[in-house]
Image (cartoon, rainbow, N blue to C red):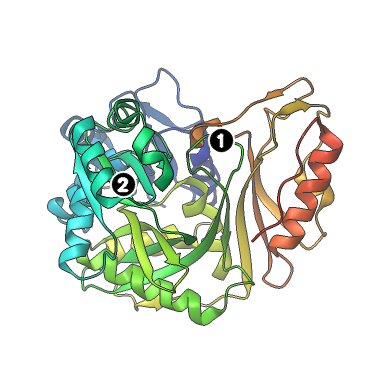
Amino acid sequence: MQESWIVLLGGNELNAGFCELAAKWGSKLAIVDWNEKPAIPCDWHIRLDIKAATEVEAAVREIAGKIRFAYTSVDVATESVARINAAEGLARPPADALVRARDKPAMSAAWADAKLLGKQYAACTSAADLAAFARDFRGKLIVKPADASSSRGITVVEADEIGGADWAAIFQRAAGAAWNGVALAEEYIDGTEYTVEMIGDAEGHVEVWGVSKKYHTANTGKNRIAVKLHYNPPDVPRERLQRIASFAGDCYRALGLNSTLGHFEVMEARDGRLVPVEMAARSSGYIATHLVSVLSDAPGAYLSRYGDVLRGATIRSGLIPSDRSSMYFFYDPSPGIWQKNDANLMQYLPGSIRSLANLRARLRTGLNIAHIDTDNERYGFEVLVAPRADLTIENVMSAERRLYADAVESALVPASPA
């Protein structure tokens, strides 16, 4: 059998599922990563900046004709991925659409033109711009970098805080985390947040593999950091999940995307409106390799389908149905001291719930648990899967409370789900 390669741009530990996937497929794994050593093992480390599309494309010519596909979990590397795939004769999304999917003001403008946006926003190049928008709007705001991810640089500003807010500090926090130095101020939408994982083909069809209900930590400052992504959650009717999936497809197409993965974040407002948060032309680590694949098949099915689309396959629009549920669970103890080396969530869950992958290395006796400020500061995770009826938020929250009561000194008990 001919040798084949997966080219992974970014060697973060949350991409470790690609090691398992490459082994399952009998492929070799090439990792492009500027660090001296990636956080996960591979067959070939290419030490380059993943944003340097021309250099990266040239470097992988050594394995031309053998590449199954290139992939990244990082927004700034989507053009590099597209060029590698195109050089291999595979489909690629339009370059201008990839730009819109990296630039939050640009995507908001596209959604506004398509009558999909449903919120007020402003791209701010100074603290004065930010303060002026806040004074004119006079409602609750969220301020974020215009082109960053991982929950970096975000500040939520309550309506009654606008008059006394330190706009210089808030602007610098957001703009300082952005590649382009721009802060995006948006109307804060109260409601429930969801994420959507999808694949679009060259004909404009968008197949949705998973919709997750998102839960955020209380153990932070004025930020929004996800600690649970619950895919195909049993507490959300299938009709509502289908509606969210359809809206996600509309927002994907409005950016001009095709022939790429899509990761979408959306708010369901208290009045039932769907309001887009942001879109990325990629997926993310274990979400791509495990979490959405296991809803309808086995680990790797989502990316196998992606490879088919890159080779010209036509897909059907809509949500793929499933009787399973999965969850990206991040350990989120309140501040305190961890007491037990071997304590983990699985000891407290029903036996029908399995963990496909985990990261528990930081959960060691003596760990000083503090508030977190970005996704990268979370303390570890489990990739959970079970029949839909068993993987309930109540089961997970009950296990979580028992774990922290046993393993953390002076921890606060997590609140029950809303």
Left or right, 387 with respect to 80, comes to right
**Residue at left offset 26%, top offset 57%:** 120
**Residue at left offset 34%, top offset 23%:** 34
**Residue at left offset 62%, top offset 66%:** 325
Decide which of 306, 179 is in the foreground and name it.
179
Q: Secondary structure at mark 1?
A: loop
Decide which of 177, 14 is in the foreground and name it.
177
Left or right, 415 with respect to 16, comes to right
Is any part of residue 324 visible from this angle? yes
Q: Secondary structure at mark 2?
A: loop
Of the numbered discs in the image, which one, if any, rests on residue 220? 1
Left or right, 270 with respect to 120, comes to right
Q: Residue 398, how many percent across, how many down? A: 79, 54
Q: Tell me which amino acid carries mark 2.
A: Lys
Q: Nearer the viewer, mark 2 or mark 1?
A: 1
Label 2 to label 1: alpha-carbon separation: 45 Å
Relative to 93, does residue 143 appear above or below in the rendering? above
**Residue at left offset 76%, top offset 43%:** 413
Decide which of 284, 266 is in the foreground and name it.
266
Q: Residue 57, how many percent across, how many down? A: 20, 37
Mark with earlier residue (2, 1) = 2
Q: Residue 45, how many percent across, how many down? A: 39, 27
Relative to 249, does residue 51 appear above or below in the rendering? above
Residue found at the far top of this picture: 36
Q: Residues within 10 Å of mark 1 (few under 14, many from 20)?
A: some
Relative to 370, does residue 321 appear above or below in the rendering? below
Q: Residues within 10 Å of mark 2 (few under 14, many from 20)?
A: some
Q: Residue 288, how many percent across, how many down? A: 46, 53
Of the numbered discs in the image, which one, if any, rests on residue 66? 2
Q: Tell me which amino acid carries mark 1.
A: Thr
